[in-house]
Image (cartoon, rainbow, N blue to C red):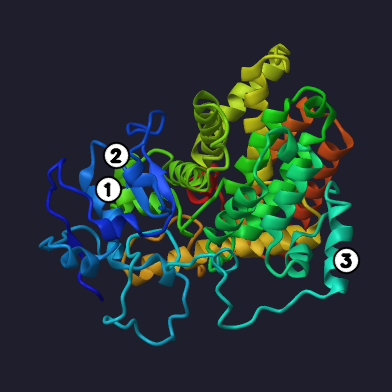
Amino acid sequence: MEVCYQLPVLPLDRPVPKHVLSRRGAISFSSSSSLFGAPDPRQLSQRRGAISYDSSDQTALYIRMLGDVRVRSQVGFEPERRSSHPYLCIDFRTLHSDSTSASYDPERRVHRLLSFQRYLHSSRLLRGVPQQIPLHILDEDYTGQARCMLEKVGNWNFDIFLFDRLTNGNSLITLTFHLLNQYGLVELFQLDMVKLWRFLVMVQEDYHSDNPYHNAVHAADVTQAMYCYLREPMLAKSLTSKDILLGLLAAATHDLDHPGVNQPFLIKTDHYLATLYRNTSVLENHHWKSAVGLLRETGLFSHLPAEDRLNMERDLGSLILATDISRQNDYLSRFRLHLDQENLCMSTASHRHFVLQMALKCADICNPCRPWELSKQWSEKVTEEFFQQGDIEKKHKLEVSPLCDREMNTVGNIQIGFMTYVAEPLFAEWARFCDTRLSQTMLGHMGLNKASWGGLQQEPAPVSEENDLNCID
């Protein structure tokens, strides 16, 4: 295993090396930094990627900017032995790789150790560089089928897996671009088509395709579900164009750069992101601030007044942060109270925003509400991601997280527990708010899916609400 090091405390006025500023990755801003002010152009120009900077944590800034020990040593920093957990030595790109594959080459340059970004993966389309391995060119038949599917994008039984195949793995780009156009948001907000396309390409690229579940297809699925909810009468007649734009962008970016492990894992391994965000909504903060970095790099909203841009970034963050499953009960209690008191006023901006938060939460965990053929695939994928985390924990002699031990759990018992303690309470309240055919269809599918998993279980393992809330992220 590669030796881990920690940077010495750095003086606040030390200049940032030029080669660092030219590296790509998703820029992440801390709430205490210049997110809502004017950032230093030196730090933002021609940058994309694994930077998280916080005025109170210069070490975290330099760790993320410099990437790994070899890069640090090249700029004159004398590494010190790191005393934290050896997991921090693992490149996130190898988390889910085959354990029987060739051993890691210590001589190979690794630019993004301790980073959630994929290895210098940039858009060949945008750079005009031909593919080393030619992609399959979609013929008219595939294109036609994808176009036909988009005509029915509001159907709840929309097969995102088939759509992803028909679009040659570009489901998130194609779907989001189509929905923004369908609502007329590109023209209404005067979005530059090149900037928009570049932004969507970067968003899709910054999802990790190696993750069984938290990948671009999941983001596309959540975006399609969000569209279904936006069309519900209670929302469609009240939401503004800005609400719709934010809802779709939040859905597309809500898990941006997800590492395939959950927050408790990052905390117990003393990961630098957990420290940076003080063990609070660690992943959600990272998703949000990575999205803000891409918005700023592409300049998608650069033509808007500065105050409007900052408000968009704040509201986008508020939506993404609402997907933190550990805060599920807080949001659900607030939603239930509003429904009990019948005081939700959709003409009030704050109430509309809260409903958007609840809609995104529903879209994020709607897999149990899909038809069995789709729901089963998602269940298997998310469980496999849990089990891969458990395999890593076993390998590094960590306590295995709840539901992550493949020898002690099954897909069925995990899904039954998730439906019972997380999904059913949320969608029951959503059906109270939006008593429509769709909300009843979702509850019906969930009941059937739960029964199907129960029928496949011979001896269901005990499940608990605490385990479900701790493991899902």
User: Which residue is at 81% across, 49% downward?
Assistant: 445
User: Which residue is at 51% across, 40% downward?
Assistant: 324
The one of 115 and 378 positioned closer to us in this rendering: 115
| Residue 194 placement (x, y as % from top left) | 63, 52
Q: Which mark is residue 61?
A: 1
| Residue 270 placement (x, y as % from top left) | 28, 52
Q: Amino acid at mark 1?
A: Leu
Left or right: where does residue 311 sit relative to residue 190? left
Q: Is residue 412 visible?
A: no
Left or right: where does residue 221 sit relative to residue 284? right
Q: Say what secondary structure mark 1 lies in.
A: helix
Q: Amino acid at mark 2?
A: Asp
Q: Is residue 39 above or below residue 107?
A: above
Q: Which mark is residue 144?
A: 3
Q: Say what secondary structure mark 3 lies in.
A: helix
Q: Quadrant of the N terminus?
A: bottom left
The one of 70 and 398 positioned closer to us in this rendering: 70
> First in sequence: mark 2 or mark 1?
2
The reply to whether discs 3 and 1 touch (Cβ–Cβ < 8 Å) is no
| Residue 344 placement (x, y as % from top left) | 70, 16
Q: Amino acid at mark 3?
A: Gly
Q: Which residue is mark 2?
A: 54
Left or right: where does residue 419 sit relative to residue 445? left
The reply to whether discs 3 and 2 touch (Cβ–Cβ < 8 Å) is no
